[in-house]
Image (cartoon, rainbow, N blue to C red):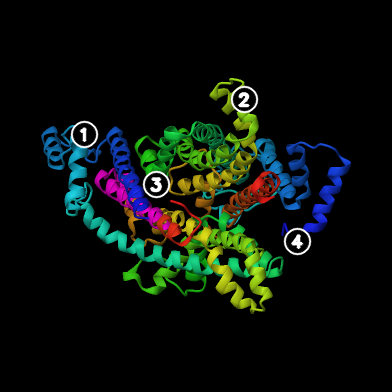
């Protein structure tokens, strides 16, 4: 087990380095810098600016300095666009927001998705089952940037129940709609996966044995069937968590929640390299961490896995 | 669903086997596919959508980039869907014919999906088959590379690429091509590992066929079933992905459009009462995705050996 974790970590570190190199090369290749504006800056000022941010150094030098600062001091450098802030400030401001509604979305997607999937599998070919399958297919196809404005239209403009955007320190009214918009498609996927794996488990011999012993159905499902049926869901959780962080780009824009997605898109349009690098790296590290955690959990739970 | 009447189905199939002697894998799969009503309906819808995307422009009364200045900004009152004016789907906020734009949007969205699937099939299959067939250290390096690439947040890298190198359909295709083959490579490799140990491959090795020829002639054709299934299921994913990029304004650029771009315009005008701007693109978007889902599921039931 320990050897497996070490081996996976050994893959994770070069992955992060490759990510750094790719984004660095991309940004270096970009025409136009962060200080190009409609009114050209005098060359002396430009030289000073570039010297301040280290842009006059050769590329490999910039990259090494950057990585060194990140690793040793956890310092992502100053932002090019907001002169009074560092990338760390931007991340510290946006990331807790993304994390808050991301985690809520994960919880909602898991709980609703699994319940729907189990219910559909237990009452296979009933109205409930068809309804669940229909909902999941619809929810997988409807993009969140279409669903979110419809939610705003209904709950904000027509009913006036919920605020149409903003964050306001994360009060619950402000969290509800982002969470619905973000979690629905993952809820649908989880429901589909749960349903099919539950069906498979319910047809297996040990469930027949449990039923033959005369156990009540409730006990058979929750005590015997649920655990093996949830294994495929577990392996889906890694990609789902990552997808939710990525999906925050749209949610942030529609609901103006102020998460890292919003900062990322703004910085991309403003060529604020430092913020882009910081967020890309952060998301990359999160992606790798989630996948690693899920794989380890999976290997730990499922005795069939040989690592 | 599948196991509702196992005995009856099995008897039927056994009976058919006794009567008709020798059916190929493909004939068998075709029969199974055509028995699946949802998949068949999906296929019909898909063909209709393709016809709409290819030839729908012929009955459009207006060019897709023609701006009717008398309707610009007044589409909520006078720009609704109507047969008489020739704007079958109404006009958008800028006075452009929504029918012509929906036709083109459908075409671009389908193109994006199909290109993504094509790259996945070509690159992913060959990559996976090679890794699986050669095995050993080569396999290890090749699949670790896929692992590494999969951990990169591609959405973010693609946004970066589109901002840096300018927004164009080509860049979008490159971005989609970069991601789409990764899953396929894994699937193809896993499947190759089992095919590799079959007798016919052994026979080919024994008669001195070169590895590349074995991969192309003996391994890849046997992968085709599973590859087709996943390619079909990949198309809707790519279409959704493109719509996401278009929503951010980084995808297809005006005067060209895609269903994602049209829907995003539609949602922005929703409160003006011009609901048709959202409805028609959304309708084509959803039925396209549903059709691909159903056809993909049908193909999986018909072709994927795991579920038999």
Image marks 1 and 2: residues in contact by CB distance under 8 Å:
no
Which of the two labelled residues, at mark 4 and mark 3, occupies the earlier sequence position?
4
Chain holding disc 1: A
Chain holding disc 3: B
Q: Which mark is residue A60?
A: 1
Q: Name the residue that disc number 2 marks.
A: B204
The structure residue drawn at horizontal position 34% and vertical position 59%, both measured from the top left corner, is A259
Residue B119 or A97: which is nearer the viewer?
Answer: B119
Q: Name the residue that disc number 4 marks.
A: B4
Which of the two labelled residues, at mark 2 and mark 4, occupies the earlier sequence position?
4
Question: Mark 2 or 4, which is nearer the eye?
Answer: 2
- Element class at badge 3: loop
Q: Name the residue that disc number 3 marks.
A: B151
Q: How far apart are marks 4 and 3 (CA)?
A: 40 Å
Chain holding disc 4: B
Estimate the x, y position of residue A152 in percent, counting from the top left: 48, 65
Q: What secondary structure characterizes most of the magenta part?
A: helix
- Element class at badge 4: loop
Is B234 positioned to the left or the right of B168 in the image? right
**Residue B296 is at least partly visible in this image:** no
Question: Mark 4 or 3, which is nearer the eye?
Answer: 4
Which residue is farthest front? B206
Q: Give the range drawn in magenta.
A: A265-294
Image marks 3 and 2: residues in contact by CB distance under 8 Å:
no
């Amino acid at each position: 087990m320990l050897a497996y974790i070490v081996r996976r970590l050994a893959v994770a570190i070069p992955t992060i380095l490759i990510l750094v190199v790719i984004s660095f090369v991309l940004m270096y290749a970009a025409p136009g810098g962060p200080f190009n504006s409609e009114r050209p800056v005098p060359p002396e000022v430009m030289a000073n600016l570039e010297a301040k941010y280290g842009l006059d150094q050769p590329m490999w030098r910039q990259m090494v300095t950057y990585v060194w600062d990140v690793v040793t001091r956890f310092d992502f450098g100053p932002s090019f666009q907001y002169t009074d802030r560092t990338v760390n400030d931007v991340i510290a401001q946006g990331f807790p927001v993304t994390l808050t509604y991301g985690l809520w979305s994960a919880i909602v997607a898991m709980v609703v998705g699994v319940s729907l999937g189990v219910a559909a599998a237990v009452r296979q070919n009933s109205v409930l089952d068809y309804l669940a399958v229909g909902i999941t297919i619809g929810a997988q196809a409807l993009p969140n940037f279409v669903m979110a404005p419809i939610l705003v239209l209904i709950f904000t403009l027509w009913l006036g129940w919920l605020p149409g955007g903003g964050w306001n320190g994360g009060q619950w009214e402000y969290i509800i709609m982002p969470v619905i918009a973000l979690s629905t498609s993952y809820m649908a996927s989880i429901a589909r996966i749960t349903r099919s794996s539950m069906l498979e488990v319910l047809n297996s011999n040990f469930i027949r044995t449990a039923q033959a012993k005369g156990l009540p159905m409730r006990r058979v499902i929750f005590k015997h069937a649920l655990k093996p049926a949830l294994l495929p869901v577990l392996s889906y959780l890694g990609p789902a968590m990552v997808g939710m962080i990525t999906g925050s780009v749209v949610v942030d824009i529609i609901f103006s929640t102020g998460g890292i997605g919003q900062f990322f898109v703004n910085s991309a349009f403003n060529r604020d390299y430092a913020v882009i690098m910081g967020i890309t790296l952060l998301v990359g590290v999160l992606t790798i961490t989630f996948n690693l955690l899920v794989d380890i959990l999976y290997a730990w739970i499922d005795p069939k896995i040989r690592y | 669903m599948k196991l509702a009447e196992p005995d009856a189905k099995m008897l039927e199939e056994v009976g058919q086997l006794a009567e008709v002697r020798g059916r190929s894998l493909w004939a068998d799969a075709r029969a199974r596919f055509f028995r699946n009503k949802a998949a068949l309906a999906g296929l019909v819808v898909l063909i209709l959508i393709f016809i709409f995307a290819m030839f729908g422009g012929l009955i459009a009364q207006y060019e897709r980039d023609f701006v009717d200045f008398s309707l610009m900004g007044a589409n909520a009152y006078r720009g609704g869907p109507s047969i008489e004016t020739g704007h079958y789907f109404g006009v958008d906020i800028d006075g452009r014919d929504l029918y012509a734009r929906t036709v083109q949007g459908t075409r671009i969205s389908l193109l994006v999906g199909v290109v993504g699937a094509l790259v996945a099939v070509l690159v992913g299959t060959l990559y996976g088959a090679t890794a699986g067939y050669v095995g050993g250290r080569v396999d290890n390096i090749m699949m670790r590379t896929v692992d590494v690439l999969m951990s990169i947040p591609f959405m973010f890298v693609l946004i970066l690429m589109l901002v840096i190198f300018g927004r164009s359909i080509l860049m979008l295709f490159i971005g989609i091509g970069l991601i789409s083959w990764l899953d396929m490579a894994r699937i193809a490799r896993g499947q190759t590992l089992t095919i590799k140990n079959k007798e016919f491959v052994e026979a080919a090795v024994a008669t001195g066929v070169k590895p590349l020829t074995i991969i192309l002639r003996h391994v890849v054709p046997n992968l085709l079933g599973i590859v087709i299934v996943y390619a079909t299921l990949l198309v809707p994913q790519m279409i959704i992905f493109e719509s996401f990029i278009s929503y951010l304004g980084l995808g297809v650029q005006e005067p060209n459009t895609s269903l994602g771009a049209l829907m995003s315009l539609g949602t922005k005008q929703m409160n003006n009462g011009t609901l048709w701007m959202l409805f028609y693109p959304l309708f084509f978007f959803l039925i396209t995705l549903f059709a691909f889902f159903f056809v993909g599921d049908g193909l999986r039931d018909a072709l994927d050996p795991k579920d038999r």
